[in-house]
Amino acid sequence: MNEIIIVKPEKCVGCNACIRSCPAPEANITQKIGSGKYITRVDPERCIACGECIRACKHGARDYIDDTEDAMNAIHRDQKLIVMVTPEIKACYPTKWKGILDWFRSKGCSVYDASFGADICTWAHLRALENGQLNNFITQPCSAVVKYIELYQPKLLTNLSPFHSHVSCSVIYVKEYQRRDNPIAVLSACISKKTEFAETGLVDFSITYRRLMEYFDRNDIRIASNPVEDYAYKFDDIQGELGSIYCRPGGMRDNLLEHAPDLRISVSDGVQKVYRELDMYAKMPEQKQPHIFDVLSCEYGCNMGPASDSDQSCFEVFRTMHDIEDESRARRKTTGGVFRNSEDKLFRRFDEELKISDFLRSYKATKPSLVPSDAQLEPIFASMDKTSDKERTLDCAACGYKTCREMATAIFRGLNMPENCLYHAKTAMENGGGGNADFRQFTTELRIAVSEIQNDVAEINKTADSTGERTNMVNELLRNIIVFCNNNPVMDEGSVKQLTGILETTMSALGAFNKNVFDTQGATQKISAAIEKLTGFLNQDADS
């Protein structure tokens, strides 16, 4: 799959907020780059493009790609696009949405209401339920949810609705029933719609509201305002009815219950809730499942999607959606008034003109990754300095994963590394490793410094016989240092303290040189410089 969520390495600080917020357990890969810095990249083949990591990142290291620029270039080449507009535009831009659509129309584009496709979607589900062709199912207007099931819960594909999303139903209607072959652009607040369009091949351009508004600002394009409570618009075909509330949590539920009030429907929305409940659903026996599980990845629905770029509060959005529902009900026409069992005139038209089979969708199952056994995780835990059950269930979540076992599993799959474990780093610090110093390199440099001291002491022996006894003592002490270094290629904190004691004795011995030996002054200065260099190495390590 082409990259949708992108990472800006220069802005990544390795805080693990992206991992912590991500519902896809294999989407993030933590790596150490050349400078020693840890960054977390995205595997586009395992990412569901829900956009939650973009919300979570406080450093601007995550962003996304859509097709806005490509669509604008097509418009400038005088291509007459069909622009399919999702219903959340009214909630995101209550005073600008008509002006936005008028701008596209001024460029020669046709403008269609995806709410109409939502009405088709509701009709198709109801007819399949009535004919016994559909049992318990999970709704699929949300492309992030579909991608999650394909990648991480493929056993639920048999439960996933066999019909296209409301947006794609709109596109199929335009292509198959209006025989339009113009390039199609979908305007939405959803980042992950690009994954759906890549799989189905129905849509040419995925334009998000955020990128569109950035384009308008960048090109100094002024959008006309419209009255807040005016929700009517002359689309190039029928304006949707109750399908206009699909973009709110439980929107599809409310559409289905309008016609089949006896259905048992559960609702879930929000990244930190819906995917956990999908995993729970996968373990439930069929007799305990609701008739319908209506799910959306975004909390508050598509109205506040990751690419909505709206400054509306959730309360303002709720009010707008209530107003839109009231307006759509006022336009809805039925036979028999508002009484139960009355026939929807729009649905009667669908019965006469549409074929349900035209709106069926297939899915691509992905073989899930193997779950490592306890034996396979044993060396992983050992690399993290976790040998006891208590250490393996600390579950501090500093790494971004909820449990130590999830982190170990990520390391097993090559998605992370032991160095990113806080407990491992802390243990290394407590053991004197500091997690930062390269002690082998340190020991090598220390041996070079000691060798310089020996050469300087040799010069002392040549210039002052009266100091021979003391220099012999110094040489003996320095030989002890060399033996110590050779026997300790990697030194811990205790070793460093022991070596420091030896050096202090060495310096004391050098300080006791006979004050009358003036001709050895140059040599002793060299000794002091070499010892300062040696002590500097030790102090540098102690500080780390």
Image (cartoon, grey):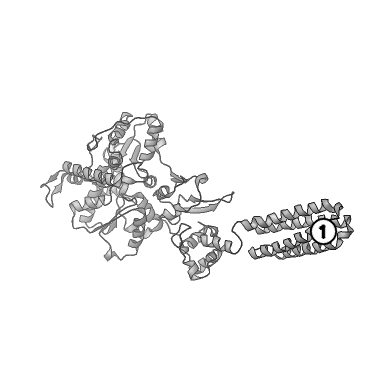
Front residue of this view, candidates 184 and 526:
526
Q: Is residue 385 visible?
A: yes
The number of numbered discs placed on residues in the rendered structure image is 1
Which three-letter amino acid code belongs to the residue tagged 1? Phe
Horizontal arrangement in the rendering, residue 333 relative to residue 240 (left or right): left
User: Picture coordinates of residue 486 (x, y %)?
Assistant: 73, 63
Residue lying furthest left: 336
User: Picture coordinates of residue 192 (x, y %)?
Assistant: 38, 47
Q: Secondary structure at mark 1?
A: loop
Q: Residue 434 lies in what quarter of the image?
A: bottom right
User: Picture coordinates of residue 436 (x, y %)?
Assistant: 60, 56
Residue lying furthest front: 516
Front residue of this view, candidates 146 and 536:
536
Residue at 19% of width from left, 42% of height from top?
Answer: 327
Front residue of this view, candidates 55 and 503:
503
Residue at 18% of width from left, 58% of height from top?
Answer: 262
Residue at 35% of width from left, 36% of height from top?
Answer: 183
Horizontal arrangement in the rendering, residue 421 relative to residue 175 (left or right): right
Dot 1 corresponds to which residue?
A: 513
Quadrant location, the C terminus: bottom right
Count residues near mark 1 (Cα–Cα under 10 Å), then give few for <14, some for 14-19, many for 20+: some
Horizontal arrangement in the rendering, residue 475 relative to residue 99 (left or right): right
Q: Is residue 2 visible?
A: no
